[in-house]
Image (cartoon, rainbow, N blue to C red):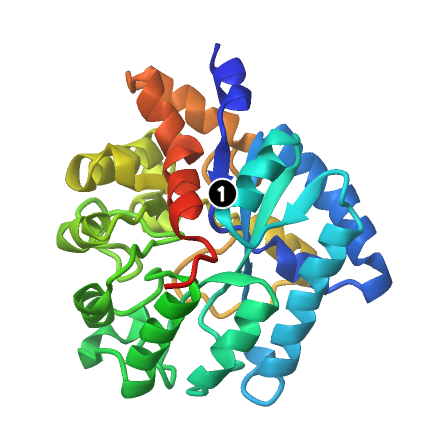
Amino acid sequence: MSVELHHGAVVADTHNDLLMAVAERPPQRWASFFRERWLPQLREGGVDLQVLPVFIDDRYRPEGALRQTLRMIECAHVLAEGNADAVRLCLDGAQVDQTLAEGRIALVLAMESMPGLDASVELLPILHRLGVRVASIAHWGRTPLADGSGEDATGGRLTEAGVAAVREMERLGMIFDVSHLGARGVEHVLELATRPVMATHSSARALRDHHRNLTDDQIRGVAATGGVVCVNFFPAFLSEDPVDYTVDRLVEHIAHIADVGGMDHVGLGPDFVREVLHDVTPPCCEDLGYGEIDPMAVLPGLDGPRGLPLVTEALIKHDFAEDDLLKILGGNVRRLFRAELGRPR
């Protein structure tokens, strides 16, 4: 029953860094590597709508950040064009709907932090022309636009350029992503927002007091804009205790966000870290810079997209109604994208 329901639903994953893994290969391998390594996993996991973030490693910053940004965007276009029978890079909600109706996977291009732009907000229209439809403006640390959540102690809000970025993204029809943004920055965005915002991969701070998670007030704020909070599967953001690194703990975060923000405002943003790291790092014990967090930790069975039916099984076990399940799995994100994606002011 759970497998049938899962594969019959529209399943949306709003954060999978697979583009990093694909872009590490030679350009002539981009399309084939995606088809061999990632497409089967997405199919087995029932993924219908996949957000592809462009994340720039520290080794490219600052000098090579823009070059790598463009390279990864080109990679997304190449892998989509080379697998046009199975996927499509979508620019608006109508294209998402059409792609799903055709039985293909809808891909949506996103930016995570945008270090290649720095404070050059005037370059946002170029990213929009290249297909970017979702974006955040900070990661763990400080950027010219805002402080990331790792800098919460500064109490920093958005810079003048960060405010301009919010305005420009709203004008263009790019959805603002508050994941990774510092606490005061999230509050600032919610004060400024006149269109729905989303959190592509954030969990509930009330259940795990970590700076990467959202407080109840922030969850309510995102919901009030009409946006969606998509729950991160990363174990260290779900619990301090490895004993609680379980799918049931993940469901607790989903249920909490639904209770606080409303059932129409919760989704899935897995952030399958280990799966990507296997593809981009050598098999050695080098320090990957995650501090006390083990980047290779996973919830049992959820080390990659093919495990997503386990989430549906757990939601059914916790007595979620079928209509609510369909919203959580992807209905809410699809509704948001249908209304806002690529739609200029």
Residue 304: percent from left, percent from top? 57, 40
At horizontal 70% and vertical 59% (from top left) the residue drawn is 77
Task: Describe residue 212's horizontal placement relative to residue 326 as left or right.
Answer: left
At horizontal 31% and vertical 71% (from top left) the residue drawn is 150
Query: Is residue 320 shown above or below 224?
Result: above
Residue at the disc numbered 1: 13
Residue 170: percent from left, percent from top? 35, 66
Task: Describe residue 294's horizontal placement relative to residue 208 as left or right.
Answer: right
At horizontal 35% and vertical 81% (from top left) the residue drawn is 145
- Outermost residue toward the front in this view: 345
**Towards the viewer: 5 or 235:** 5
- Please state which amino acid type lies under the numbered disc 1: Asp
Task: Please rate how many residues cluster around mark 1, counting C-alpha atoms within 10 Å: few if below 14, some from 14 to 19, many from 20.
Answer: many
Residue 220: percent from left, percent from top? 16, 49
Task: Describe residue 210's horizontal placement relative to residue 66 as left or right.
Answer: left
**Towards the viewer: 8 or 174:** 174
Q: Quadrant of residue 315?
A: top left
